[in-house]
Image (tube, rainbow, N blue to C red):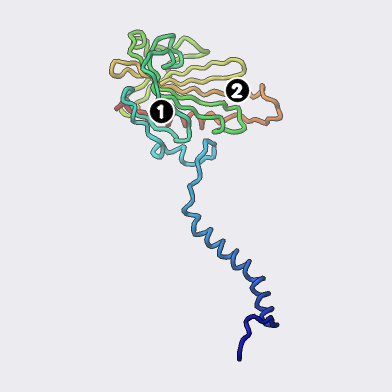
Amino acid sequence: MNIEWNKVTWYSKLIALALFVALPFVGFYYGVQYGKLIAPLGQAPTMVATSSGTAYYDDPSEWQLDANNTAGGFSIAYPIDFDYSDNFSLSPSTDWRVNSDNIPGIQYFTLTVPNTFEPQTNFSDATLTVGASADTTAISQCMTPDEGGETAEATSSVTINGTQFTIFNSNSAGAGNYYQTTSYRALHAGKCYAIEYTIHSGQIANYPSSYNLQPFDETKIDSLMQNIVGTFKFL
């Protein structure tokens, strides 16, 4: 039988109709299979600083280690998605610790936990700093409770990676804001070192009720900051 390819017949129309109907489904099927094939090659999801409860924030071994602070002589680890700075000036300043009483020192490291870590709460932020001073007054008063704030007292001591620190707690409030500061202090290599974190929150009564804010989890934030302090180590 001779087939006339340029002639329209009933079976050529049937074949054309079948291809017209089938091709979109075939294309969709192979598109899905291709998507499955390349999916593992995509970028991993970016971590964000939220209170998702992931084990990452409870496992310091998974955190970023800052061990390049040779001038400060220490290393410290922290969750990689928190803002930090170890770009310090060797020029003395009074911000090396919270209540320095205008005594000069060096602030070597700063870390900030944003309010997105506890969304829909009155949590504002938390800041951790590492500073030290070789000033003779700073050294002589290193283990003296601060005079400022509503309370300022030594509460306990703890050994962190071989170094004993004395812990001081202080609270202050103003303009609808509340600040809780925990200060770990130790004398080392002729300096007074202070590892401090301040948890900043707002008074819920000052926010519009439409915000529907809840009290933040103080225990969780405090535990996180303690875990960061616990990674501190003199080099």
Residue under pointer 1? 229
The Cα–Cα distance between marks 2 and 1, rounded to whole angstroms, is 24 Å
Left or right: 29, with 89 as reference point: right
- Residue at numbered disc 2: 202
* Quarter-of-image position of residue 230: top left
Does residue 223 appear in this view? no
Viewer-proximal residue, 21 or 194?
Answer: 21
Residue at screen point 35% across, 14% down: 133
Residue type at numbered disc 1: Val
If you read the primary sequence from the N terminus, does the residue marked by circle 2 or circle 1 appear first?
A: 2
- Specify the farthest residue to the front: 6
Q: Residue at x 69, y 78 (%)?
A: 13
Q: Nearer the viewer, residue 14 or 132?
A: 14
Q: Which mark is residue 36?
A: none
**Image location of residue 199, percent across then percent down:** 51, 24
Instruction: Give residue 22's position: percent from left, percent from top.
Output: 64, 71
In the image, residue 11 lies at what x, y percent?
A: 67, 82
Residue 47 visible within the image: yes
Q: Residue at x 50, y 55 (%)?
A: 39
Asked if residue 63 is positioned above or below residue 98 in the image, the reply reads: below
